[in-house]
Every structure is written in structure tokens, then in C-alpha cells.
Image (cartoon, helix red, strand yellow):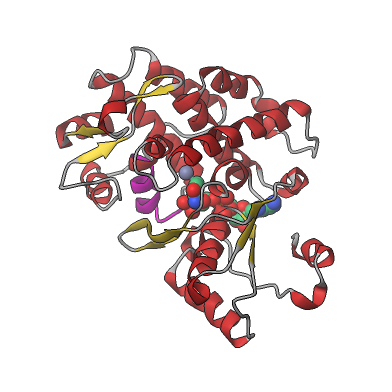
């Protein structure tokens, strides 16, 4: 949709457009190999750069290509989904999925720049806007209660597809970027604090994988946040009332809050075990203490949970 505009803005002779089919199913080693081979055949050298133009899938994949191509060339992220603008394009994580799980192979490769052009949201379907809001809601829960309620109050504007970019929408997007950037800049390699960005993602990634990616990332994370908040309340980590508040905002945004019918609890637990946050068999989850603050400051910002506790939350 937007490659020609980039081509027109850059010297047209120096830019080649490589594409991949849309969707999480193409965030694979095969896509990485194909893109890398095409670049090699076309003679791109170490003086090249990758422009990742697309949603989070393209950002993660193209970032991974850039980070491994001739031991690393720069990447410029130009995110075109709400989710990629406020979350995926920031923080240097690149990667691909494997049959065992999401993002299990990847690198940290910080972008040379991130360019957010809100007009590209004009063509973004409603379902993708909702999915993006899931990460904005996450930012509110993990770091800023007032922001969560500001998002909840602006859902009509954020989801409107009339092409209007209001000042309010701009300021919400900027605040989300600030929250992500602040957490990431305090812990670039995920040694501690950055774990809080994984809220909703331990259960979410498992649900996303098991859906065969028919659930979009943001939708799976919404389910993950609802269930992980419930878990946090059940085991006494979160203040009473946290889980219903999280679920309410998600529902208002039109996001799912329950497991898809027929989900097997055992299969979800199994998928969670291959998640990166599992150390020596115990599942560790980033959980809220209340809206706007996460638990586990003294234990690396994750909380160890037993299978029984997880089963109860998933049931
Ligand atoms: N690296 C990180 O820190 C990080 C953080 C969050 C999510 N992610 C990853 O991001 C991915 C999800 O990203 P996503 O939600 O952007 O999904 P996506 O990249 O699959 O994009 C969603 C859909 O929207 C289409 N699209 C993109 N921009 C459009 C536009 N402007 N107009 C019309 N259609 C458009 C895409 O072709 C695709 O079909 C997941 O793989 C997730 O793991 C990474
Ligand atoms: Zn995410």
C-alpha cells in the first residue's frame, strides 16, 4: 500500500521492494531465508539498510533479516499498524516463530530510527485497530492508571475509521510510545524491569500459537491479560477489583477476554512451558499488583505460579 511513497521519498535507483505474504504464519525461518537470499542475489552489501514497512510481523521479520545480514546492517522501522506503532517497532526485539512457539529465535537489534506516520492508519481494518488497543491497554495496566482510563474514554475515536486523526488520538499514541520506550530504555536486554511488558503474553502467546494464528496477536494478548489479572487476584498478588477493571476495558474495546471454546487447559500449559519466561520448570508470569503497577519488584518482575494455580485461572 505504501511502498511507492517510500520509493518516491528515497532515491528510486537505490531501493528494492521485497514483500512477504501477510500474517503471522509468514514470520518464519523460510521467510527470513527467502528475503536474505533475495538480498544476496541482488548484491546488497554492508552499506545497505533495511526499511521495515508494515505491521509487527514485518517489523520483527525485517529486523531479524537486518540483524543477521552480513553480521548486521541498520534497520529503520516504519510501522503501519497501531500495534506496531505503539509497541512492536520500539525496543529492538526482532525474531521469528518456530513450531515450538512464538519469537523463540531472534535478536536485539535496535532500529536506527522509527518513523510513525499516522495517516497510514486510514487503511487499517477495524479488527487490527482493536488488536493495537490491546497493547495500549497493557501500557495503562503496567504503568499508568490515568492512561488506561484515558484510553477507555477515547475508544470511539481510536476505533473510528473515518481517517480523522484527532489531537487526543495523537496524544494517546505518543503516551503509549513513551511508556514502552521508558521501560525499554531502563532495561534494554530484558534482565528485569522489561518483563512487565510481557503482561498478558505468557498465556497470550500460548493461546495465539494454539489458535494456529487465527487469533491476532493483540486479541490473544487481550485474553492473556484478562486471565493473568484473574490469576493475580486469585493468588493474592493483585488488589481486589483489578481483574474486573482490566476485563471491562478490554470488552469495551471489543476485545476477547475468555479462552476460545474448546481450548484444552493441558495444551495451553504445555505451550506455556516452551515460553521464554519458563526457568527450570516453574512458570513465571508478569502480574499486576493493581492498575498502573506491576508485582514482583524483588523477584525480577515476575511471579512464580504453580500448575494448579494456572489451571484454576484457565478453567
Ligand atoms: N518486537 C516487539 O517488541 C513486539 C511487540 C509486540 C508485538 N510484536 C509482534 O508483532 C506482531 C503483530 O503485529 P501486528 O498486530 O501489527 O500484525 P501484522 O503485522 O500481522 O499486521 C496485521 C495485518 O494488517 C495489515 N496491515 C498492516 N498495516 C496496514 C495498513 N496501514 N493498512 C491496511 N492493512 C495493514 C497486515 O498486512 C496484516 O494483514 C506479532 O508477531 C507480535 O509477536 C513484537
Ligand atoms: Zn505484544
Front residue (pair 86, 185) = 185
- Residue 94, horizontal then vertical, whole percent: 48, 58
Identified at 34% across, 52% down, the residue is: 210
- Residue 133, horizontal then vertical, whole percent: 57, 35
Front residue (pair 62, 299) = 299
Q: Can I make out residue 261 in this image?
A: no
Q: Quadrant of residue 173?
A: top right
Identified at 72% across, 45% down, the residue is: 121
> Which quadrant holds the N terminus?
bottom right
* Left or right of 139 in this view: 295: left
> Which quadrant holds the C terminus?
top left
Decide whether residue 114 is among the magenta residues: no
Decide whether residue 204 is among the magenta residues: yes
Front residue (pair 51, 80) = 51
Identified at 57% across, 40% down, the residue is: 132
* Left or right of 143 in this view: 118: right
Give the total of numbered labels: 0
Q: Quadrant of residue 127?
A: top right
Extreme-right residue of the structure = 8
- Residue 19, horizontal then vertical, whole percent: 63, 70
Q: Main secondary structure of the magenta part?
A: helix
Up/down of 138 relative to 237, above or below: below
Q: Can I make out residue 156 in this image?
A: yes
Extreme-top residue of the structure = 240
Region of the chain picked out in magenta, as a range: 203-213
- Residue 61, horizontal then vertical, whole percent: 52, 63
Up/down of 51 relative to 234, above or below: below
Amino acid at each position: 500500500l505504501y511502498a511507492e511513497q517510500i520509493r518516491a521519498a528515497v532515491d528510486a535507483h537505490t531501493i528494492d521492494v521485497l514483500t512477504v505474504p501477510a500474517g503471522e504464519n509468514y514470520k518464519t525461518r523460510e521467510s527470513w531465508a527467502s528475503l536474505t537470499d533475495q538480498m544476496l542475489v541482488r548484491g546488497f552489501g554492508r552499506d545497505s539498510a533495511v526499511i521495515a514497512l508494515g505491521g509487527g510481523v514485518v517489523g520483527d521479520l525485517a529486523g531479524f533479516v537486518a540483524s543477521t545480514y552480513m553480521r548486521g546492517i541498520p534497520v529503520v522501522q516504519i510501522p503501519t499498524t497501531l500495534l506496531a506503532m505503539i509497541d512492536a517497532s520500539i525496543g529492538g526485539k526482532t525474531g521469528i516463530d518456530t513450531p515450538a512457539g512464538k519469537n523463540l529465535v531472534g535478536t536485539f537489534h535496535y532500529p536506527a530510527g522509527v518513523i510513525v506516520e499516522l495517516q497510514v492508519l486510514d487503511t487499517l481494518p477495524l479488527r487490527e485497530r482493536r488488536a493495537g488497543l490491546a497493547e495500549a491497554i497493557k501500557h495503562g495496566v503496567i504503568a499508568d492508571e490515568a492512561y488506561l482510563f484515558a484510553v477507555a474514554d477515547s475508544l470511539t475515536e481510536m476505533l473510528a475509521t473515518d481517517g480523522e486523526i484527532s489531537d487526543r488520538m495523537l496524544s494517546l499514541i505518543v503516551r503509549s510510545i513513551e511508556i514502552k520506550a521508558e521501560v525499554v530504555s531502563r532495561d534494554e536486554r530484558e534482565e528485569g524491569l522489561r518483563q512487565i511488558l510481557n503482561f498478558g503474553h505468557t498465556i497470550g502467546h500460548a493461546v495465539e500459537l494454539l489458535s494456529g494464528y487465527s487469533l491476532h496477536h493483540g486479541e490473544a494478548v487481550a485474553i492473556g491479560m484478562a486471565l493473568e489479572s484473574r490469576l493475580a487476584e486469585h493468588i493474592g498478588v493483585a488488589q481486589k477489583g483489578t481483574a474486573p477493571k482490566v476485563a471491562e476495558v478490554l470488552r469495551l474495546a471489543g476485545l476477547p477476554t475468555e479462552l476460545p471454546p474448546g481450548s484444552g487447559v493441558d495444551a495451553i500449559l504445555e505451550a506455556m512451558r516452551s515460553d521464554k519466561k519458563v526457568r527450570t520448570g516453574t512458570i513465571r508470569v508478569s502480574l499486576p499488583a493493581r492498575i498502573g503497577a506491576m508485582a514482583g519488584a524483588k523477584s525480577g518482575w515476575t511471579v512464580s505460579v504453580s500448575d494448579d494455580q494456572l489451571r484454576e485461572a484457565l478453567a
